[in-house]
Image: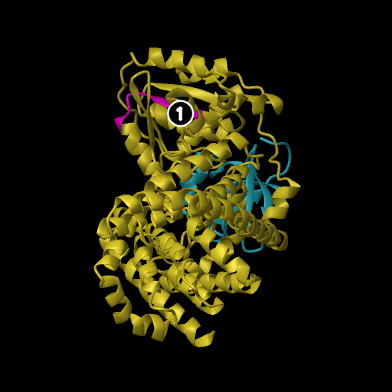
Amino acid sequence: MGKSVVFMSLAKKYAEVSNFPGTTVEVSRGKWRGNPLTDTPGVYGLAGANEEEKLAEALLAQADLAVNVVDATRLSRDLFLTLQLLDRGLPLVVVVNMMDEARNGGLFLDLAKLEALLHVPVIPATAVKGEGMAELALALESLLKKEKKSPRRQEESAELRIRANSIYRQVAPPLAKPAFSRLDRWLTGGLTGLFSAALVLAMIWWLLGGVVAGKLVDFTEGVVFNRWLLPPLVRLLGGLLPPGLLRQVLIGDFGLFTMALAYAIGLLLPLVFSFYLLLALLEDSGYLPRLAVLLDNSFRPLGLNGRAVIPLILGFGCVTMAVVSTRMLSSRRERLILIFLLGLAVPCSAQTGITALMLVPLGMGWLVLYGLILMGVFLAVGGLLNKFLPGQATGLFLELPPLRLPRLGNIWRKAWKKSWSFLGDAIPLFALGAVLVASLDHLGILARLELTLAPWTRGWLGLPPQVVSSFILGMIRRDFGAAGLMALALAPAQRFIALMTLTLFVPCIATLLVTVKEQGLLMALAVWFSSVLTALAVGGLLNLVL
Amino acid sequence: MNLLSAFPGKRYLVLKIKDPLARRQADCLGMGEGEEVYCVARKANGPVILGRGGQMVAVGGKIARGIQISPRRGPKR
């Protein structure tokens, strides 16, 4: 609809924009001429069908006025929400966005008549080009002086739809036949769809594992950090600081500079940024809802429907954000199953990057085995949850946005914003991890822990005792733990077992906190402990087999 | 007949939607009871892709089985 683009234009602040509703998982707040401005989740109605609609409804209850952004090419659909907003008595301005697409498609809309029928200002706009934004500002100025009216009786959805259709017929030509392109057919068809999905996945792995992990990280970590930045810094601080805890915490093996910053910026930032670029491409093209159609039936044994694909794929970017975006699912049961699976068996972009970096040199076989085991755990745990949780799966009902060529500017800004937020989340946690492990190391506790846990590490997992520090770091962030493995000399099978165990290991602290917020402490603890058990069970079994 | 028996490319009138949540969502999108929709594509057990104007909705097999439709002939409404 372009709601977030209109928000950005008014607030002069970036808000996430995608080619389907549900991307505004976090409410963006800004200011317009000193007045607070809120970007609500994208919804088509206020029926309370999911958490997003409930959130939008709660935000509207606090608002003094509302800007209703409708899509000129989908006016019939969007008038439903317009009428719901009018019935709530809020002073309203309707922005008819994407007028350029309507004009190009030969769709004529009588907006003067629409304004007369709705009794509120109607502004034609093409928000991405800034068209109509000055008129919107003028309309908002005059609307600020208006008082809220008392709300009208809430009509049944069927009655509202009849009113919306009646208004639509007076301002627009009859609806055209829907266009389902050959590409749509290809992407959603059984074999062709699976082939396309495999192709997309292979391309992501090749770009991430081969190009970014192989070439870019070699430069950022190997040259920039290990050759240019760290040696002079270690020399400088080494000269200034006497041997002791502070020196170890700053520039020791697990130091703030030598490990936390080098991992976060030199190693993970290029991987995360590249992954977000690819993810933004998928999001903005409209491919993800097609993938939801393709995989709908495959999700049934897990108690989910195809809609779950969207938070799941977002989870490959950042699991914490994906946990929040499970709000788009219709039932609490589905959210619970998906949050469990996200915490357990979905590696985030940073961890995927490290896995690619460490497994690609070993050969494709290891990479395929990694994917198969992860999928096996995912299916087994999802199937068990579906069997034992009370209730039933809901069916798929999902709007398919048109396939669009993504706008490069938006992709770049979105990837940059998410990577920036990754750094903001990761660096304090990395620093905490570095201080913790360096202190444990300095006090000799790490060595004692390694010795105590040796029956598990060496006996059960077949790994050297030094992996204990990686697992401690992994409790803070799994990617941080996985990065720690790179410093260890491991045989191919050991490397594989360590990576697999860490992938299934506990979700990072940020995910844990969001899970507590979304599903309660009990559920968060259940995810945490079952992750530990699953990780150790799979790691141990692999050690027996490999 | 239910939605799983629809033929791609044909027009249908939506008579009844059993699932209450899907009924509300369909009303929001203009594809509710009493509306005319196109069957755009269909897999044997769902999803069925319905179209109306420029918009499309994928309906999973479980919901599609509970949607009653009747074929439309003659001029478009």
Q: Does the magenta stretch include residue A66?
A: yes
- In-image side of A438 versus B39 (left or right): left
In the image, residue A344 lies at what x, y percent? 42, 66
What is the secondary structure assignment of the residue under circle 1?
A: helix
Q: Can residue B59 be seen in this view?
A: no
For badge 1, the amino acid type reads Phe
Task: Depth check: give the residue in front, A202 or A457.
Answer: A457
Assess disc 1: are there few (<14), some (14-19) or many (≥20) residues with their C-alpha within 10 Å of its C-alpha. many
Q: Quadrant of the C terminus of chain A?
A: bottom right
Q: Quadrant of the N terminus of chain A?
A: top right
Task: Depth check: give the residue in front, A426 or A149.
Answer: A426
Chain identifier of the residue bearing label 1 in the image: A
Q: Residue furthest right?
A: A182
- In-image side of A268 versus B45 (left or right): left
- Residue on which disc 1 sits: A7
The colour scheme is: by chain
Q: Which residue is drawn at 60% across and 56% down?
A: A208
Chain in cyan on the image: B
Q: Which residue is drawn at 33% across and 13% down?
A: A145
Which stretch is magenta? Answer: A62-69
Q: Is residue A379 visible?
A: yes
Chain in yellow on the image: A
Give the vertical position of A297 relative to A537 (above or below): above
Q: Residue at x 57, y 69 (%)?
A: A371
Give the vertical position of A288 relative to A452 (above or below): above
In the image, residue A315 lies at what x, y percent? 48, 56
